[in-house]
Amino acid sequence: MKHDTVTPYNTQHEKKEQVAQMFNNIAGRYDLLNSILSLGIHKGWRKKCVNILQEKQPKKILDVATGTGDFAIACSKLKPETIIGIDISDGMLKVGREKIKNLNLDSVISLKNGNAETIFFPDSNFDAIVVGFGVRNFQDLKKGLRNLHRMLKPGGQLVVLEFSYPRNAIVKAFYNFYFSYITPFIGRIFSKDTRAYSYLTESVKAFPDNEKFTTLMSEIGYVNSNFTALSMGIAAIYTGEKPK
């Protein structure tokens, strides 16, 4: 099954509309559930992404699918001039703005509604673009990646953090059990949306991960495209650059 045919609610609405509805439904409990379900590991993954960007010292960063702003907040440690976070869920953005305000980062980070495929910023506008657990939710993956490529400055870097499907048989068995049974069960306890955490598993399985994704990046025009597997293959960091 192609990744763009996997949707949260299997209705006639476009994928991005369903994804926005799903995240609006779970926005209030999203951060709590994230920490419970990932056992806090996702924070270390994001830190690795920020360390990758350290060498480039980006001054202007775009955080795509920012959600409640965690990746943008992590990137603030790079001391950029500005970080713009975009997301299609107003509910998630509302939570994110409150967090950013409480951290006194609202002079650096601003959040707005938008998606990777259609958001318009000038060509060659950002030193770095990051996407944390968001590319699976792109309605049109190639269109989204092309638009991000357009907005990167020559030599600018794309860093994508995303779940992947483990290859090791033992890890895969545990992964399938955890995401098929434990994740939806915990999601039902804490969230009124029973589909949200079932969709997570389905979308990860359908996503073209690892070499397939880096090949796609190269086809679109990114150079030095590669990936690093994390935590026995349950996630990966993808990097690529816009040619100078």
Image (cartoon, helix red, strand yellow):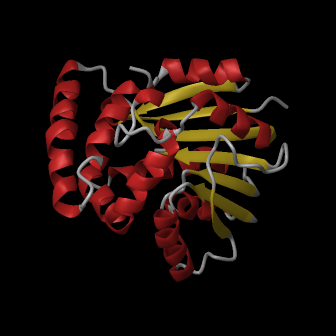
Query: Observer-nearest residue: 27 or 193?
Result: 193
Image location (x, y in percent) of residue 108: 68, 71
Left or right of residue 230, residue 160 in this image: right
Image location (x, y in percent) of residue 217: 63, 25
Locate the C terminus by quadrant: top right
**Is residue 234 shown to the viewer in this render?**
no
Image location (x, y in percent) of residue 156: 76, 41
Q: Residue at x 58, y 32 (%)?
A: 140
Q: Residue at x 71, y 27 (%)?
A: 222
- Above or below, 53 relative to 139: below
Query: Observer-nearest residue: 162 or 55?
Result: 162
Image location (x, y in percent) of residue 25: 36, 61
- Above or below, 202 relative to 81: above
Left or right of residue 220, residue 131 in this image: left
Left or right of residue 154, residue 57 in this image: left
Q: Residue at x 78, y 43 (%)?
A: 151
Quadrant position of residue 114: bottom right
Q: Residue at x 47, y 64 (%)?
A: 92
Quadrant position of residue 200: top left
User: How many circles with numbers are drawn on the protein?
Assistant: 0
Query: Observer-nearest residue: 172 or 138?
Result: 138
